[in-house]
Image: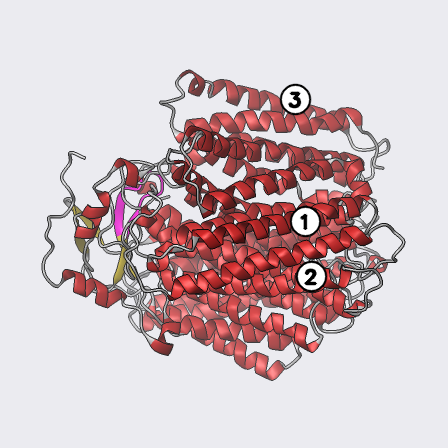
């Protein structure tokens, strides 16, 4: 936590949890957009903008796939990889599943009902 | 280990005696002034268990009432109070406190620290909880207990339908218990990241500590939502600010969003510590290291993050959009993946090792069986159409009791069987344990499994009785019998525990052959010396460690400054950084806590004079406590052994108190964000913003207010660079003048805009943001003169400047928050144009 400690705590932490943050941002964007476009103030004819959500999903999945690809090394050397590397890879895999799964709704559901 | 041990043995004569004298627990009534984590931890655990029993008795009252149809054992009104208090006490006074309490007791020993970094804060958190919680429980005896259900939905809990004080007791009582939980969370985060034994890297840290770290961070982000929610509902009840009244632009769903944004992570806040305990106990009883340890740690973090996307699955019948619900439904199912990773890791570990049969193993197996069933029904209710069918029925009651009792109560009982020997060296009876387990396990399933069926047959939760011809009679009677059988198991456990704790103290040893550091010999001062750790299973991989530590051959076998102290290490690699001097026992945290609890409870009863006296006591007690802190000691550096010479204390970003302040401000910012969300939510429901008849203050005044805040911050920044100079106190006072002037401008602007908070939810939301800023200005009004006084008294020096640095942080935060609220109230109408 101390910049003098040269441990780069926050940098390492951010690198490890980046996939979870991507999931979180994707969730907030999609939920927030759907909620806002179904209120009296932001009502959109035809329901929430599923194209924008679709684009956000493709971007999120691409980033997560890249993060998982970048961290694939832990599979080649499972015994030697550190906690941070393992966490980054697992989070990427978990977030890929979570974002793909959450996005099924975008394909199937429309309107504000 | 080939490297020489840090300190030579035998240790010099008198060294141990000095260490003991500094840490000795006072006897008799003075014990209550103790702040040591072992003492506070035991009091905390005991009080939490007391609330478990009390809320359990309420549960039995519920089951007695429902045993037969058309029962008149409890009236409808009393039943409402009983089920509300059962849920509230179980969740807020048992479940959250007990997991924090166990952590307060266990963590320092498990991490190789002598105590937590803020012992007086632990004592304050405990006493506020104990005094306030007991007084809150007593409202039941006066018929004043809350009766709107543990999640207190408005409009039922608004003044129209709940005109009495009952709801107010919930809102104010729970409010400060949450503050106590947050204080505990800050303590745990700093303790885990700053006071681990040298060599205990994050990778080697016990999984339980990981679980508590994740949970503490979750508390920091989840609890502010409910603090904000309770504040809004209390403002509505006290001043008629209509946040949740639809006719005046409010929205009852706003409460549900705020409550469940806390309420769902809360389920994991309760479960993850239990999961951490399980991950600590399972390797011991299997006699082998945890399978997939890194995956389990990652899963804990994953569950912690995903749990923030699940809140709205409690609101599937509230009329949210289908698309929003589909996201939440998917997230609710996705969280099963990291949870399953943990369950499979435990099964694999048990499979791989040779299981020591005994009480902990029984309760752990019981936990897995019940929790997995609860998890599976959880996935069922995450499916929206199924939830629509069973929402608010006994199916849900069955589901969450399987998750909570299975996921938390059984692991906590396993933990008590496992860790009680730490208290006086005696184990609980294995023979009785079998009875306790089978009564609890059998009784639990008998009580709650039939509820799945009663729910599917359509029995709604919270009804105080039912007609005899609905087909629910037999199932309800079975549930009641099961509840009493379960209770019998708990009573048997309580007798055994009392019997065991009365036995003569024996050497603790390592009765389960565990691998973690809490099984090193521990006294009031913790371990004789602070161990050097080289593995994630130190007691297995370093067989001589226990003896070496007891001999004083590891770090800091003495009190180097004549005060209580522990070693601060770096957050990732646990490299020694500085000597952290700890405060000693004191009555002040108890006094401040009693004042805090008294203030909230007496205010609820409208006893304003007494409440004010209590409030002043709390403030003065806290100031007196802080006044004693941040004092320099004679030594500038100490030799802790192994050629390591550490500075005494640290300043700025190297200091633990600086980071604790940052975390406190993150909590603060989250509360502010919740208020800002409330403002956004009510604004988005408008066709025109501001609503007709309302307006915002002139923009020039906002610029002036922001400029004054910035000027105050600049002055405080100058004060931090004027340490030891005569101008420093005056700079603090000038900064205060700027802050006060800024808020004066805000008030003038609001008056000019003729904002009437009781006329519309929008006006109330703006007034709330302004009031929260006002609260910070009040805080600065205390902090500014306090800082000046310390400067004049010579209590700010280059080595003890935490007061100055930390107050500066609060000051800059207030400036940022002021600019944020002034911008937010203007930006939203602009965006909506």
Residue B186 visible in the shown view? no
Label 3 and label 1: CA atoms lie apart by 48 Å
Query: Does residue B358 appear left or right of residue B444 in this picture?
Result: left
Q: Badge 2 is on which residue?
A: B232
Tag 1 or tag 2, which sits nearer the N-term? 2
Of residues B247 and B828, the one nearer the viewer is B247
- In the rendered structure, the residue with mark 2 lies on which chain? B
The label nearer to you, 3 versus 1, is 1
Q: Badge 1 is on which residue?
A: B446
Crowdedness near tag 2: few (<14), some (14–19) or many (≥20) residues, C-alpha within 10 Å: many
Q: How is the image coloured?
A: secondary structure
Label 2 and label 1: CA atoms lie apart by 41 Å
- Residue A21 is marked as none
Label 3 and label 2: CA atoms lie apart by 39 Å
Examine the image and state in which quarter residue A75 appears: top left
Q: Find the residue positioned furthest to the bottom.
A: B609
Residue B63 pos. (x, y %): 72, 60
Residue B667 pos. (x, y %): 53, 53
Q: Badge 3 is on which residue?
A: A58
Q: Magenta part of the protein: which range?
A: B567-578
């Amino acid at each position: 936590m101390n910049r003098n400690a040269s441990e780069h705590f926050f940098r390492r932490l951010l690198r490890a949890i980046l996939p979870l943050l991507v999931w979180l941002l994707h969730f907030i964007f999609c939920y927030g957009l759907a909620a806002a476009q179904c209120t009296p103030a932001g009502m959109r004819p035809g329901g929430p903008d599923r194209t924008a959500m679709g684009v956000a999903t493709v971007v999120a999945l691409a980033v997560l796939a890249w993060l998982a690809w970048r961290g694939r090394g832990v599979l080649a050397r499972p015994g030697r990889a550190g906690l941070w590397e393992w966490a980054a890879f697992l989070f990427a895999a978990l977030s890929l599943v979570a974002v793909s799964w959450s996005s099924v709704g975008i394909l199937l559901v429309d309107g504000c009902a | 280990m080939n490297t020489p041990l840090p300190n030579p043995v035998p240790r010099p004569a008198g060294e141990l005696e000095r260490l003991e004298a500094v840490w000795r627990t006072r006897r008799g009534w003075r014990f209550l002034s103790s702040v040591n984590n072992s003492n506070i931890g035991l009091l905390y655990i005991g009080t939490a268990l007391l609330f478990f029993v009390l809320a359990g008795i309420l549960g039995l009252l519920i089951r007695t009432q429902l045993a037969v149809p058309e029962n008149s054992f409890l009236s409808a009104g009393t039943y409402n109070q009983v089920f509300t208090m059962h849920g509230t006490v179980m969740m807020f006074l048992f479940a959250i406190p007990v997991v924090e309490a166990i952590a307060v007791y266990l963590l320092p020993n498990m991490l190789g620290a002598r105590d937590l970094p803020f012992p007086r804060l632990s004592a304050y958190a405990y006493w506020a909880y104990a005094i306030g919680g007991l007084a809150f429980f007593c409202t039941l005896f006066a018929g004043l207990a809350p009766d709107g259900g543990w999640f207190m939905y408005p409009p039922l809990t608004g003044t129209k339908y709940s005109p009495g004080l009952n709801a107010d007791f919930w809102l104010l009582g729970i409010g400060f218990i949450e503050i106590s939980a947050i204080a505990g969370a800050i303590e745990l985060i700093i303790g885990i990241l700053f006071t681990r034994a040298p060599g205990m890297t994050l990778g080697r840290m016990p999984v339980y500590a990981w679980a508590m770290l994740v949970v503490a961070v979750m508390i920091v982000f989840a609890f502010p939502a409910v603090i904000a929610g309770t504040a809004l509902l209390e403002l509505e009840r006290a001043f008629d600010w209509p946040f949740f009244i639809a006719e005046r632009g409010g929205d009852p769903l706003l409460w549900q969003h705020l409550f469940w944004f806390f309420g769902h992570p809360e389920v994991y806040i309760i479960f993850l510590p239990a999961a951490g305990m399980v991950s600590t106990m399972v390797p011991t009883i299997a006699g082998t290291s945890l399978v997939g340890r890194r995956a389990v740690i990652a899963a804990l973090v994953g569950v912690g993050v995903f749990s923030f996307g699940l809140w709205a699955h409690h609101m599937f019948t509230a009329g949210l959009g289908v698309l929003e619900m589909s996201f939440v439904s998917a997230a609710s199912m996705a969280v099963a993946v990291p949870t399953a990773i943990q369950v499979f890791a435990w099964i694999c570990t048990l499979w791989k090792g040779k299981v020591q049969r005994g009480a902990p193993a029984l309760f752990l197996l019981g936990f897995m069986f019940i929790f997995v069933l609860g998890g599976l029904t959880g996935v069922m209710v995450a499916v929206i159409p199924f939830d629509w069918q069973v929402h608010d029925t006994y199916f849900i009651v069955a589901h969450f009791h399987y998750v909570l009792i299975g996921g938390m109560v059984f692991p906590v009982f396993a933990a008590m069987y496992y860790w009680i020997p730490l208290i006086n060296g005696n184990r609980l009876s294995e023979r009785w344990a079998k009875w306790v387990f089978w009564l609890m396990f059998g009784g639990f399933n008998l009580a709650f499994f039939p509820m799945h069926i009663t729910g599917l047959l359509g029995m709604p939760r919270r009804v105080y009785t039912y007609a005899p011809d609905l087909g629910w009679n037999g199932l309800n009677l079975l549930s009641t019998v099961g509840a009493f059988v379960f209770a019998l198991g708990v009573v048997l456990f309580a007798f055994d525990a009392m019997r065991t704790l009365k036995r003569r103290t024996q050497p603790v040893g390592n009765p389960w052959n565990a691998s973690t550091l809490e099984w090193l010999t521990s006294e009031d001062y913790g371990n004789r010396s602070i161990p050097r750790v080289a593995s994630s299973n130190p007691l297995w991989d370093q067989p001589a460690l226990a003896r070496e530590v007891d001999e004083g051959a590891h770090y800091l076998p003495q009190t180097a400054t004549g005060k209580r102290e522990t070693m601060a290490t770096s957050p990732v690699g646990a490299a020694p950084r500085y000597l952290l001097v700890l405060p000693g026992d004191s009555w002040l945290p108890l006094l401040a806590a009693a004042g805090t609890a008294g203030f909230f409870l007496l205010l609820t009863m409208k006893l304003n004079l007494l409440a004010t006296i209590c409030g002043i006591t709390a403030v003065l007690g806290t100031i007196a406590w802080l006044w004693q802190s941040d004092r320099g000691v004679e030594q500038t550096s100490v030799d802790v052994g192994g050629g390591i010479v550490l500075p005494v204390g640290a300043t700025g970003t190297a200091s633990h108190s600086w980071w604790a302040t940052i975390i406190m401000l993150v909590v603060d910012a989250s509360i502010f964000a919740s208020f800002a969300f409330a403002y956004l939510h009510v604004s988005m429901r408008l066709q025109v913003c501001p609503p007709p008849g309302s307006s915002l203050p002139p923009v020039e005044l906002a610029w002036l207010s922001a400029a004054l805040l910035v000027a105050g911050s600049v002055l405080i920044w100058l004060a931090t660079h004027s340490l030891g100079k005569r101008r420093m106190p005056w700079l603090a006072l000038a900064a205060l003048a700027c802050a006060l002037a800024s808020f004066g401008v805000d008030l003038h602007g609001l008056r000019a805009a003729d904002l009437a908070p009781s006329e519309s939810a929008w006006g109330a939301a703006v007034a709330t943001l302004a009031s929260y800023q006002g609260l910070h200005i009040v805080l600065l009004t205390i902090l500014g003169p306090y800082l000046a006084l310390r400067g004049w008294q010579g209590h700010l020096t280059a080595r003890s400047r935490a007061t100055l640095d930390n107050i500066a942080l609060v000051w800059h935060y207030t400036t940022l928050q002021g600019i944020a609220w002034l911008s937010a109230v203007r930006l939203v109408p602009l965006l909506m144009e």
